[in-house]
Image (cartoon, helix red, strand yellow):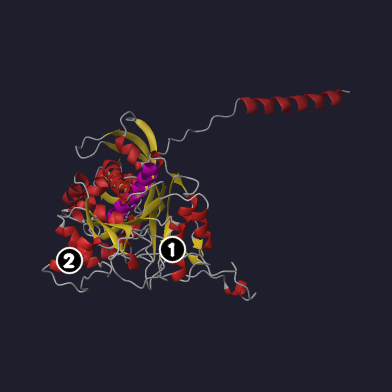
Amino acid sequence: MKALLTMWAARGLSRALRAYCTSAPCPRPTQPPRVSIRDALVSQNSSGHSIKVQGWVRSVRSQKEVLFLHINDGSSLEHLQIVADPSLDNGDLTFGSSVEVQGLLVKSPYKKQNMELKADRIEVIGHCDPKSFPFKYKERHPLEYIRQHPHLRCRTNALGSILRVRSEATDAIHSFFKANGFIHIHTPVITSNDCEGAGELFQVEPSKKVKELGKNFFDVPAFLTVSAQLHLEVMSGAFTQVFTFGPTFRAENSQSRRHLAEFYMVEAEMSFVESLQDIMQMMETLFKATTETVLANCPEDIELLHKFVAPGQKDKLEQMLKNKFLIISYTEAMEILQKASQNFTFTPKWGVDLQTEHEKYLVKYCGNIPVFVINYPFDLKPFYMRDNEDEPQHTVAAVDLLVPGVGELFGGSLREERFHLLQQRLARLGLADTYQWYLDLRRFGSVPHGGFGMGFERYLQCILGVDNIKDVIPFPRFPHSCLL
């Protein structure tokens, strides 16, 4: 009996201990909150609070009585100054090394910065050998040099600023469309359509092991998309305003500063639209609203690029934003080019597409103000553009927006909604069977509609003044180059 009581007592004590540990856990040392560099720099009410920051060392300066570090985590162009006792430097604190720093966030006595961190602990997470690291402290490397190191170039100030602007512009575009009642559509990357009709396609095929089965994976030839327009047209039969923002691919063998094999496109489609003016107004509003948002939210990054990469771009951008975009017809553009004193590599003549040199001349002729060129020759444009029925010239309701330094930025048109005209054109091109589904869109509740596309990388080139398109995308893809 005594043994049984002892056993029950032990069990009771065990239950009590478990209950105590559950209801009153043993206190653990509290960890200071992790704060981004950007938030630390703009902090107003956290002075004297213990925080933790993580990032990469941008400079080290060790004196007899004090150690100064500048670290950055990519959240802002400005670095956070760390002030510490020299004893916290064990020799691994070098330019490029990754660190975790804990200490008190205090008001900085220096005018150039708002806050600084008085460190009581510095831990080196990853060592960086400054001798073999391709980027050197205090050196301003040109973009051409940075481009040679695609896996490391995001660590430079210039690429960091470009990518922050890119992120902000992406968000601004989505916000613009949402505020204007557009529905975001995820369009496919793999498609059986050739929207542009140029044949510059990447064909998608399965690996050799799957291919040995002797069947086409999709039963039809499949390609990486060159445009989401046709898919957006499908959706515009149910939603009056739709857009997409995603990767686009062109197998164009070009090494120019304006072309990539993979790039991002902003595309929109609007139903119940009967005038090119409505499309042009949406293009201009999108450009200006997005740019003003980026300028407001990334002032330091924009200033760095306008100062060191593209001097004079600030004034050009202000000129674009304050002026109403101009409008000329394709025929007027050709007349301007033919009267020009400049010798062009490609002779301008009616019925021939505009080349980059023509586009840049037209923008310069118009006072470096963006200019819409409208009503292109019928035979120059794809089958889906609306016939103006304006013999003898015979044009379509197409529009391109030309901007300083880049040339063509937007392209758009009214779409041919009239069944009989579209059917006749597809038949002439031998595409009636392939695009039977496209004709169906005109048979079942068709409406006048139109849309446009904007090359996102060219947009960034335009507002930042970056000369080469390969420098405004994280991982550029172009002929003979697919690194990483």
Residue 226: tell me if it is visible: yes
Instruction: Estimate the x, y position of residue 155 in percent, counting from the top left.
Output: 33, 55
Q: Amino acid at mark 2?
A: Leu
Place residue 39 in its image quadrant. Answer: top left
Report the quarter where the N terminus lies. Answer: top right
Read off the residue under disc 2.
Answer: 337
Residue at far front of view: 391
Q: Residue 195 vs residue 362: left or right?
A: right
Magenta stretch bounds: 157-177
The residue shown at (15%, 53%) is: 312
Q: CA distance from mark 1 to mark 2?
A: 29 Å
Image position, residue 370 (x, y; %):
22, 53
Residue under numbered circle 1: 195
Above or below, 473 relative to 271: below
Q: Amino acid at mark 1?
A: Cys
Residue 101 at least partly seen: no
